[in-house]
Image: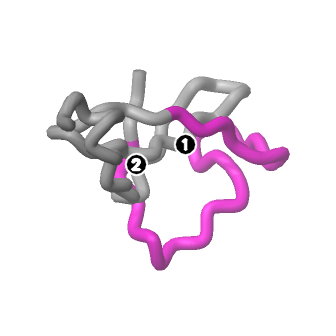
Amino acid sequence: MNRIEISVDDKLEKCTECGYALGFHISVEREKGNLRLILHCPHCGTEYDPGLVLQASPAESGGK
């Protein structure tokens, strides 16, 4: 699957690979105790990584 890194400054209204323009799905990936948000084109499956990382709470990251 193709993953494209994008800047948070970029405006992403449609998929750059297939042109789909009705929005994106969102997934969350665990990364070193944090959560990374990934955008997915529901039409072609291209993934976009805008570099958005959320700090997980201690309970979510396995800590106490």
The residue depicted at 39 percent of the width and 58 percent of the height is 52
Q: Secondary structure at mark 2?
A: strand
Q: Which mark is residue 54?
A: none
Q: Which mark is residue 39?
A: 1
Q: List x then y, in percent, for residue 48.
A: 47, 45
Left or right: 14, with 55 as reference point? right
Q: Residue at x 84, y 45 (%)?
A: 22
Q: Residue at x 21, y 40 (%)?
A: 33
Model colouring: one colour
At 70% across and 53% down in the image, what residue appears? 14
Query: Looking at the picture, does residue 29 appear above or below residue 13?
Result: above
Q: Residue 41 placed where, x, y %?
A: 64, 35
Quadrant, the C terminus: top left
Q: Residue furthest right?
A: 22
Number of residues whose C-alpha sits closer than 10 Å to that of mark 1, classed few (under 14), some (14–19) or many (20 or more): some
x and y percent of residue 36 in the render? 36, 45
SS for dot 1: strand
**Which amino acid, by three-letter code, is at mark 1?**
Leu
Q: Main secondary structure of the magenta part?
A: loop
Q: Earlier in the sequence, mark 1 or mark 2?
A: 1
Residue type, mark 2 in image: Asp
Are the residues tagged 1 and 2 within 8 Å (C-beta)? yes
Q: In the rendered image of this protein, does residue 30 appear above or below residue 35? A: above
Q: How many marks?
A: 2
Residue found at the far top of this picture: 1
Magenta span of residues: 4-27
52, 63: nearer the viewer? 63
- View extreme (front): residue: 64
Q: Which mark is residue 49?
A: 2
Quadrant position of the N terminus in the picture: top left
Crowdedness of circle 2 by 10 Å Cα count: few (<14), some, many (20+)?
Answer: some
